[in-house]
Image: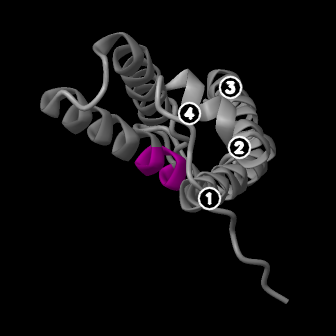
Amino acid sequence: MKQSFTPLRLVLALVCTGNLSVAYLFFFSPDVVSSLFRLPPPTEVQQYLTMTIGALIGVFGVGGLLPLFKPLKYGAIIWMLLLMHFSIFLIDVVVLSRGLMDWKIVVPEMLYFLLVSTALVRWYPLGSIEGTKKEELPLKQS
């Protein structure tokens, strides 16, 4: 029985698109990021940090393209994306519990990160499906 990677590929395409879009926004226009989160205009240091975060998210976006084409070979990258999304979900939980940001901003973001994390776990590629064994090929004797 062969495992279908179509749902995983759809999730990875969504992740890559989302990461690259956010990376573009953070890297090229940190002022827009401040206005989206209803924050005052950023200082030079905050702009630098925002651009750095944009570059890191861009690396995650580009890295997510590899398992999009070969999910079995790049399972470690899927784990990395899973940990990234779940970590950001946990950060959002802390931000919400401390009242640092308005819940109308944080909750949709939390839902996205939780759903993507769940989908990456659900459709993680397995080498073989349980209950099936690979056939052993007999050795050629010369």
Label 3 crowd (10 A; few <14 / some 14-19 / many >=20) = some
Q: Amino acid at mark 2?
A: Ala
Q: Quadrant of residue 18?
A: top right
Pick the front one: 141 or 128 = 128
Label 4 crowd (10 A; few <14 / some 14-19 / many >=20) = some
Which stretch is magenta?
79-84
Gap between marks 3 and 2 measured at Cα: 14 Å
Residue on which the image places disc 4: 34
The majority secondary structure of the magenta stretch comes to helix
Gap between marks 4 and 2 measured at Cα: 14 Å
Tell us which disc is closer to us: 4 or 3.
4
Gap between marks 2 and 1 measured at Cα: 18 Å
Q: Which mark is residue 44?
A: 1
Pick the front one: 42 or 120 = 42
Q: Amino acid at mark 3?
A: Leu
Residue on which the image places disc 3: 14
Labels 4 & 3 near each other (Cβ < 8 A): no
